Image (cartoon, rainbow, N blue to C red):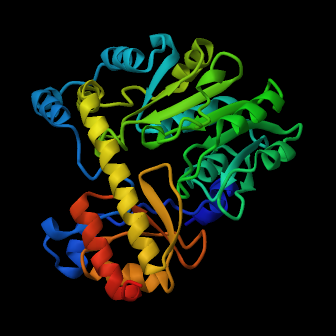
Amino acid sequence: MGKKIEDIIRQDIKKIAPYVPGKPIEELQRTYGIDIEKIVKLASNENPLGPSPKAVEAIKRCADKVSRYPEGSGYYLKNKIAEVFNQPVDNIILGSGSSEIISMGMELFLNQGDDVIFPTPSFLIYKILAYKIGAVPVEVPLQDDFSYDIGMFLEKITSKTKLIILCNPNNPTGTIIYKKQIDELMEKIPDDIVVISDEAYREYVDTDDFGTAYPYLYKKNVIITRTLSKIYGLAGLRIGFGIARKEIIEFMERIRPPFNTTTIAQEAAIAALDDQEYVKRSFENNISGKNYLYSAFNALGIKYIPTYANFILCRIPSAPAVVKKLEERGIIIRGMFGVGPEYVRITIGTERENLLLIQNLKDLVGEEK
């Protein structure tokens, strides 16, 4: 046998730790023999209400079409996105989740050795994709309360900086960039720097002071990424989209993989976008669940970061043991031990799921104070 694989692969790949998703329900069933219907998953920021019934019906209607390749351009879905988000169709590109849009944006602009700036802690895919391309990841720490410090982003810019990624709201902290902050950043960054604004959790934001990058789509080199995995409840279909100026989208289309979104995903997405009443109900469930969990965490003495997303970052003493004991009881939350040894991320669930979580946390972290 010739050289070892590790001697001939690209060296940047060795720097990548595989992305570890939230533990699936099926794994808990296999490990502990728990009835799958009794398992509560609050680990992956999915919509606890599930998909819109209209999306489910659309999936059923097009199930017999799966022997054919999908409509490659996603014509009808892009037109629906253009209608809902008030953008020209030429400014929209579809992806297998918003992660693929981020990947295409990075591949389009980054050369080997270019700097890409992004926050930490944040979505791990940014660093993975940077190393995959051969770019240099430049991480900007969030402040002690996990808020953004735009001044620190600006300080990191050098002649090697090609791209800045903003996660807004940020995963896993739930914190946001405010209007004043986005204005400051966009005003001061050089015109040749590209900004990817990952706004996957935008629909959950409940403040008018949210600093979306939308106002800068035609003023700066901006790509906004959105997803139907979160509030639209289509995580299992992997469907997302990007919005940018036409000339940026045209170049992104050159590297978009053929048939990168499926027929079922496209049809379900159209139906989900049509059901804005369901989106409203999902938003309201999130607000009421968030307020309940805040109150319960306060009573239990659990510290947490106020969130603008559908999850809450918490500090729990002996967090690894608590995560394991919850799993043994059929409740999955996400350990965020890379953030700190006591951090966990908890998706906001249904009323029943939130209540069940708190009942079990009372047993594990102490009686209500």
The quadrant in which residue 289 appears is bottom left
Looking at the picture, tell me which residue is in the foreground, 339 or 349: 349
Q: Is residue 220 above or below residue 171?
A: above
Residue at image coords 83%, 28%:
190
Q: Is residue 312 above or below residue 86?
A: below
Q: Is residue 44 visible?
A: no
Q: Is residue 223 visible?
A: yes
- Asked whether, in this view, residue 134 is left or right of residue 192, the answer is left
Identify the image quadrant of the N terminus: bottom right
Residue at image coords 40%, 78%:
323
Q: Position of residue 319 (x, y in %)?
A: 48, 81
Q: Is residue 294 above or below residue 368?
A: above
Q: Position of residue 6 (x, y in %)?
A: 62, 64
Q: Is residue 46 above or below residue 133?
A: below
Residue farthest along the right direction in this orientation: 159
Looking at the picture, tell me which residue is in the foreground, 182 or 289: 289
Residue at image coords 66%, 41%:
165
Residue at image coords 59%, 33%:
212
Looking at the picture, tell me which residue is in the foreground, 96 or 292: 292
Identify the image quadrant of the C terminus: bottom left
Q: Position of residue 356 (x, y in %)?
A: 25, 72
The quadrant in which residue 300 appears is bottom left
